[in-house]
Amino acid sequence: MNVRGEVVDAGETRAVSTQYGERNLAEVTVREDDGPKQVTLWGKWTESAALLEEGMELLVTDVETDQYQGETTYSTSKESSVVVEPGFLVDVTDIRSWVQCPRMYYLNKISGIPLNYPVVKGTIVHEVFGDLLRGRELDDSIEERVEEAGLQLGLLGMEASDVADEVRQNAKAIEGWLQQGVLTEEDDWRSEQLLVSQQYGIKGRADALRRGMPVELKTGKNLKRDPRFQDKIQAVCYALLLREKGVPADTGTLLYTKNTALDRGDESGDLSPAKEFSIGDGLLDFVVRTRNEIAAMEYETDVPTGYEADATCEYCFEQDTCMVVSGRLDQESKAGQIGNALPEEEQRYFEKMYRLVEEERGATHEEYAKLWEQTPEERADDDRALIDLKPGSQVEIEGGRWELRATRTSDAVSKIREGDVVLASDGDPIGGHAEMARVKQLGEEVVVTADESVELRRLDVYPSELSADRMLTALHDFVLKGDPRQKDVLFDRASPDFSANHQTYIDNNEAQNEAVNLATNAEDFALVHGPPGTGKTYTIARIIRAMVEQSEATESPRNGGGATAEGGETALLSAFTNRAVDNALEALRDQGFEDVVRVGTENGVRPDMQDLRFEQGGDPNERVKELRDASVVAATTATCGSRIMREQHFDVALVDEASQLTEPATLAALNLADRFVLVGDHQQLPPVVRTENDLSTSLFQRLIETYPDSGVMLDRQYRMSQRIQAFASREFYDGELRPATGDVAGQRLAALPDVDTSALPNDLQNGVSFVDPDGETVGNTNPIEADRVAEVVQSFLDAGLSPDEVGVIAPFRAQVAEIGRRVSAGVTVDTVDRFQGSSKEVIVVSFVATGNLESPIFEDYRRVNVALTRAKKSLVLVGDEAALCTDPLYSRMVDWAK
DNA sequence: ACTCTGCGCAGAGGA
């Protein structure tokens, strides 16, 4: 039996005499649902007890019970594990680096692993290893894997043939050992096993399993008899997770692939690549206690000093970095500090943002917890999984991967979308067989691709920490390596400067022309505030062209190389979403500009922009040249934080949708350039974050409030009729948003070809109308309202509008699904959040709520602004008047619409 | 009480 609950009393460790001699114990009280329980933690588990704070979650497995003075008490048994904050999933590689030195764990976390040759080669060797296990021919595999890494190798100044030769050396050791196994008996192999433990709060991916035992591949050399301790620990972690699945893993194997016969002569020692060791309870418990140290430190958002372990700094290859970071941020560390501390405000900024990002990471971890704790029955009402799949074919495709198919047996709504990375399983993602997979198709039939085959019965959302990781590295790069002038401006120590060189770029829109001038004259930064429909994308394209075409004032070539072929400036074009990046590219192309490289995944980039997409594979020198020669590189801000992009430098960075980005996410793009331009609208939706804190204030908003003179608002809109834009202009833009022309102001449905507005019911004749269907809410839906919305949509279709000219917006996904079942194909039905950025001739908004507006979704008025400004010629609001009138803004909206 | 996009998922290593 297990005890699990919130710690209410952490207890003190004390020594007692027992029949086995003196032993340590700590008595901890936790609150379970049915009241407090006292658990005695014995022996080495007191080390974990010492980490506890009130409020932490504690799990003690396999406890023994006792009756003492009529009360039941609990204590650890031989089989017990003590798990601190079990909901916090710790990566196996983090446990490994913590064992080396807790400070190294921290440094890796804030700075990421930079681009260096040993790491890139290590990755290639691992890929080749996987290919060999999947039965692939060695030379084919090496050639392809080296080719794929073309850009990275090029940036490191490596030639493909040299790398292939080196990899071949490592592969020889692998092959030799594999053949050995096959000779002795039938080996049972599999590669790349993903393991996630609910019980221990550990996740990771084992390189391979051989007869159910973990095998870890290392590219380096180890001539000692025993594997390195941290390498062992990695294998022990996987063994622990395998045991939880009922696989009795008791032996670990480390494969040091640089141990080859070639080394004979220059060294003596154990040259066999494979080193086995046995895994006992002592090691398994050690891993859990180490994991607890990490979980406890992250709970407090503490920074490790290095004293937590007995690592020696003297021989550490990270010693210099460690001392510099300690010195700059004034952190206590075992290695000591060198250099001057950063100004107080920079240190405080780093600490504050670090905490916020970690809080955000914590929220992601809670999503994991939900993922594992729910039974399949509970999952049925959950939108984070598709559990109703009937397995179909499993076909091997190129590269040894698998295409898995299944059919859906219900029409349950889910968060999962095409292109997502998910956990594909046989129905039990924890105890059963699960693989990481990518969703290729998500209709009646579900198609995913994965490294190994699975009986596809279930898909789960796999929460990613990538955005938290990227935010941290961007924060690190900015505070510790950022440009001094840029920091002066962003820390309010200096005001942004502009040169005064006025030109006419756009002759029919004063604000747009002003925006281009402001951007090209900015010596630090410029802000462009673009309300709905104001020609933001066109202006962005014009700015980019103007920047690239203006000659470089000062010599600041990228990457220490020469200027670009044209001699102009280089620009980074970035945005929060792939969609916005591609829209900006489309506008650039419309203006005849093609000197662009699009960096992004095949999934993310729109089909008509694939021809601009940068291919990372190929000849190393050619890949580097293509990236460096482009005047404009376009990528999402998330990609700007990638290892490749962190190596690039530009004269200027332009970031669209900047009001939807957290401050650290914006920094990822700004770090890559000398100057920047942010484009956004803080009256539309704020950054997407899971936590409620200062992360939801964008850098765009902070700067436009601090430096209003560094910004210009585009005030002429080309989208909405006068009648439609009036409310948004008054409520959100101080009445300053106006139609660009009389034609825009006076546009009507009747002007569309084949549309006969006389066919419309009376109450829909006006450009803006309000309909109260007298519905009733059922959960997050309102079926009667959905019926009425469908009728309204049909009226417009009957009047001659085509389905793609009509859009329906609802606040909740459940209502979106409800309406989706009722309207004709081709009519876009979506949430407000997902409609941001697009528009339709006719928009119907379903508000769902009846009685009151008691849901957080209605609190943010910016959502109303987005919903109402999607329509060009006709806007229909469908909702319960009484509910809407409980709030002053919604009430004014009803008055305006009626 | 709700909404949400990114990211090859995680890991690849050096004395």
Image (cartoon, coloured by chain):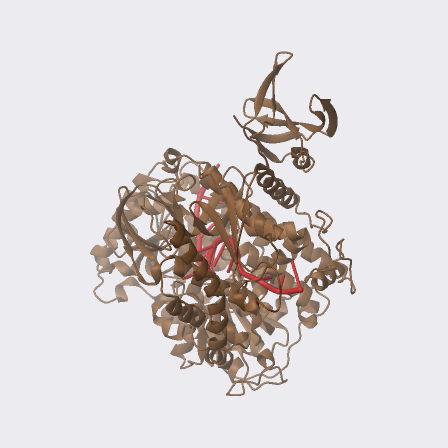
Chain colours: A brown, B red
The x and y percentages for residue A882 are 41, 39
Front-most of residues A583 and A612: A612
Total marks placed: 0
The x and y percentages for residue A38 are 63, 23
Front-most of residues A225 and A151: A225
Q: In this view, does A581 lie to the left or right of A447?
A: right
Q: Is residue A405 left or right of residue A155?
A: left
Vertical placement of residue A7 versus A359, above or below: above
Q: In this view, does A92 lie to the left or right of A308?
A: left
Vertical placement of residue A299 versus A345, above or below: above
Residue A736 visible in the picture: no
Residue A327 visible in the picture: yes
Front-most of residues A12 and A792: A12
Q: Is residue A475 left or right of residue A144?
A: right
Residue at the image position 27 percent from the left and 45 percent from the top: A391
Vertical placement of residue A567 versus A188, above or below: below
The x and y percentages for residue A75 are 61, 25
The x and y percentages for residue A342 are 75, 62
Q: Residue furthest top?
A: A70
Front-most of residues A107 and A374: A107
Residue at the image position 55 percent from the left and 22 percent from the top: A34
